[in-house]
Image (cartoon, grey):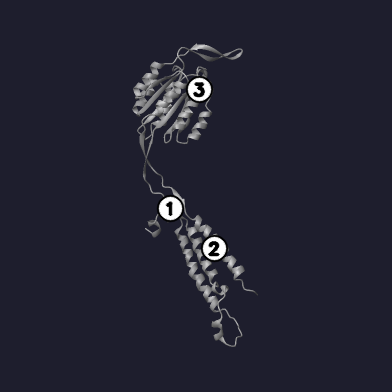
Amino acid sequence: MTIFNMIGTSFAHPSAFFLLLLIPIMVFYYFYKSKNRSAAIIYSRFDLLALQPKTAKERLVHLPLVLRSLLVLCITVALARPQSFTSNEDIYTEGIDIAIALDISGSMLATDFKPNRIEAAKKLTREFIEERKTDRIGLVIFSREAFTQCPLTIDYKVLGSLLNEVKNGMIEDGTAIGNALANSINRLKDSKVKSKVVILLTDGVNNAGEIDPLTAAEIAKTFGVRVYTIGIGTIGQAPYPVQTPFGIQYQMMQVEIDETLLKRISSETGGKYYRATGNDKLSEIYSQIDALEKSKIETTSYRHKKELYYPWAAAALFLLFSELLFSQLYLRKLP
């Protein structure tokens, strides 16, 4: 272990230190050349020279050599690329992994929520995300099929942008609750945290997909994933958009949510079922979920590298200009 390693610094190119051999060579050449430099003076008495005070130029005659030697030193260290590394350590933070499964089927355009169910769900989901600090959150959207809109991330800005892009029509119409739940579980199954949660929002009845919702619930239970289900829709009837020869019109239709299925999914996985009948109620549900018990995540920090050669390179540049200034201007010999 070198002295540099002991003080927490290492070098990417230690062989560059061979350049330091230039310094003694420069010093030897400088004094050799000075010794053999011939000069002629006509002076009657040499003892009088000792009485003459030294000028500033005479006192600084060797300064360019000093600056040149320091320049080589700084360039050498910069080329060797000194680096420091943060040591590996276990970091403990509070957090959970959350996959949000959002129904974007045509019925989510019903206006019993303002402006409609899907936009209200997006707005309150966005607010829920903004309240998180250390949780990894992913987004799954579903209709007849289900796909991951955003994998688990702590980059909430990216997640928010992808959430903003969600709209009805991205997937063929239908309600594949089982597929949505299975896709969400797939995002969480390899997670090492103790608390893994799916928040599934839907306003309908499972009528599509290859995976049975209860089978998906069993898979969730196997991987220790708790599922919180939210049924979105008022009690009774709600205005649904219907395509007519005159365009989209809203008609009052019965709200059908398979609450029995959603309750069973949550019960099987240790979660809870909620019924959101309006914007305020959905906001309240999100607040309750926001208060979920957080588990400790143990994370080994990466070995971060920090380059330390910048000050040496800057010092070399400064010394270069200083040496040129003294040699070519202040200490320049007149012809």
Residue 302: image location, x then y, percent:
41, 45
Residue 55 image-quadrant placement: bottom right
In the rendered image, which quarter contains the C terminus? bottom right
Q: Which residue is mark 3?
A: 118
Q: Is residue 63 rendered to the left or right of residue 11?
A: right
176 and 332: which is toward the camera:
332
Q: Residue at coordinates 56% horizontally, 80% vertically from top-left?
A: 52
Residue 223 image-quadrant placement: top left
Residue 118: image location, x then y, percent:
50, 22
Earlier-in-chain disc, 2 versus 3: 3
**Contact between labelled residues 1 and 2, with CB atoms less than 8 Å apart:** no
Q: Residue at coordinates 36% horizontally, 45% vertically from top-left?
A: 89
Q: Residue furthest bottom?
A: 44
Q: Which residue is mark 1?
A: 84
Q: Residues within 10 Å of mark 3 (few under 14, many from 20)?
A: many
In the rendered image, which quarter contains the N terminus? bottom left
Q: How many marks?
A: 3
Residue 49: image location, x then y, percent:
56, 83
Q: Residue at coordinates 54% horizontally, 63% vertically from top-left?
A: 319
Badge number at residue 293: none
Residue 212 seen = no
Q: Which residue is mark 2?
A: 319
Secondary structure under tag 1 reads strand
What type is the residue that disc 3 sits on? Answer: Ile
Secondary structure under tag 3 reads helix
Earlier-in-chain disc, 3 versus 1: 1
What type is the residue that disc 1 sits on? Answer: Ser
Q: Residue at coordinates 52% horizontally, 58% vertically from top-left?
A: 313
Earlier-in-chain disc, 2 versus 1: 1
Q: Residues within 10 Å of mark 2 (few under 14, many from 20)?
A: many
